[in-house]
Image (tube, coloured by chain):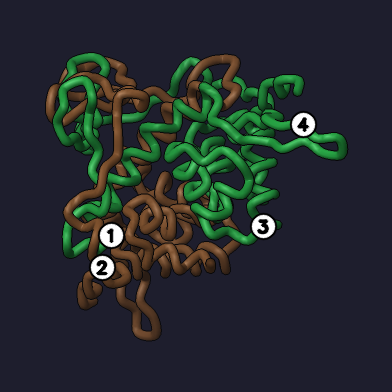
Chain colours: A brown, B green
Amino acid sequence: MRHDELLDANCAISRAAAILGERWVISILRAAFFRARTFEEYQRTTGVARNILTDRLNRLVTAGVLERRVYEQHANRALHEYRLTEAGLDLYPVIATLMTWGNKHGGFVHGPPIELVHQTCGQVTEPVLTCSGCGEPLDPRQVRPRPGPGAATASPRMTAPPETPA
Amino acid sequence: MRHDELLDANCAISRAAAILGERWVISILRAAFFRARTFEEYQRTTGVARNILTDRLNRLVTAGVLERRVYEQHANRALHEYRLTEAGLDLYPVIATLMTWGNKHGGFVHGPPIELVHQTCGQVTEPVLTCSGCGEPLDPRQVRPRPGPGAATASPRMTAPPETPA
């Protein structure tokens, strides 16, 4: 199977993996959540080679996770910024849980490089995955998958909403 | 920067991305959570080419996310199975939040292909990321990063614990 065929799979994880499971995409999304906007800001934050960065930004725009907007117009060219869409912001739990895992298993002998402060309560927070039904923390051993409403019928390959006109 | 240099970064997300941000790794982890064990089970579940699957399984063992165990010994060869370690099980929130995102944005016009049932309360569940301090759902706009205890001092590249002897 080719990696882009994951976009056709009747599996939510596979379709998410089609986008996030490419080198540098997680680093780029991290930069976006840390407020990178221009190509240069993404390049400086991630250290990714420019040709690869161009490819990944285009993919993330195509997938509807980032949107490209003109923020400065010159006679010959426009300067673009890349911002998270609502779908992009919805990836926050993925980024936050990656951070939690990295803090625990990343070999940080001096403790987490970054802490998250929850403005609402003022405390340093570690994201906890809880059940939408009962509110208790979710232990994988207590969770079972079963076919859902979309199990029987394949859905078309995921596509992004049309880009906002410049 | 080379992709494996993410393992040196003083950033939890980057170190997690060094492992998960490779093609097919998320699919393989998904298979592990869905109880794949042998090489053939992983290959059948993911559809990944055998040489790539070999590489990824080895990487995940090196990273301490999967462990390789002999489950059957023959005169000439041993058959191995690949199981999630405690560190691998700790990736559950990442996989669950990827599924949630994929269900919402993956273009599943007929609904989620898979539902998760929380055995503890018996309800279909959607994982909710909550604050460890106050228990409220975490909105990215209400969360601020700040330097943590490990910010000032670089930690050595992350390595896996030694493999369990066969």
Question: The residue under label 4 is which amino acid type?
Answer: Gln
The first of marks 1 and 3 along the sequence is: 3
Q: Quadrant of residue A61?
A: bottom left
Q: CA distance from mark 1 to mark 3?
A: 27 Å
Q: Which chain contains the residue that carries disc 1?
A: B
- What residue did someone put label 3 on? B50
- What residue did someone put label 2 on? A155
Q: Mark 3–mark 2 contact, CB under 8 Å? A: no
Q: Mark 1–mark 2 contact, CB under 8 Å? A: yes
Give the number of the mark in front: 3 or 4.
4
Question: The residue under label 3 is which amino acid type?
Answer: Arg
- What residue did someone put label 4 on? B73
Give the number of the mark in front: 4 or 2.
4
Q: Which chain contains the residue that carries disc 2?
A: A
The first of marks 3 and 4 along the sequence is: 3
Position of A13 relative to A57 (above/below): above
Q: Which chain contains the residue that carries disc 3?
A: B
Asked if residue A70 shows in the view, the reply is: no
Question: The residue under label 1 is which amino acid type?
Answer: Gly
Badge 2, how many Cα within 10 Å: few under 14, some, many 20+?
Answer: some
Q: Position of residue A146 (x, y in %)?
A: 26, 43
Question: The residue under label 2 is which amino acid type?
Answer: Ser
Question: Farthest residue toward the bottom?
Answer: A76
Which is more toward the observer, B112 or B96?
A: B112
- What residue did someone put label 1 on? B106
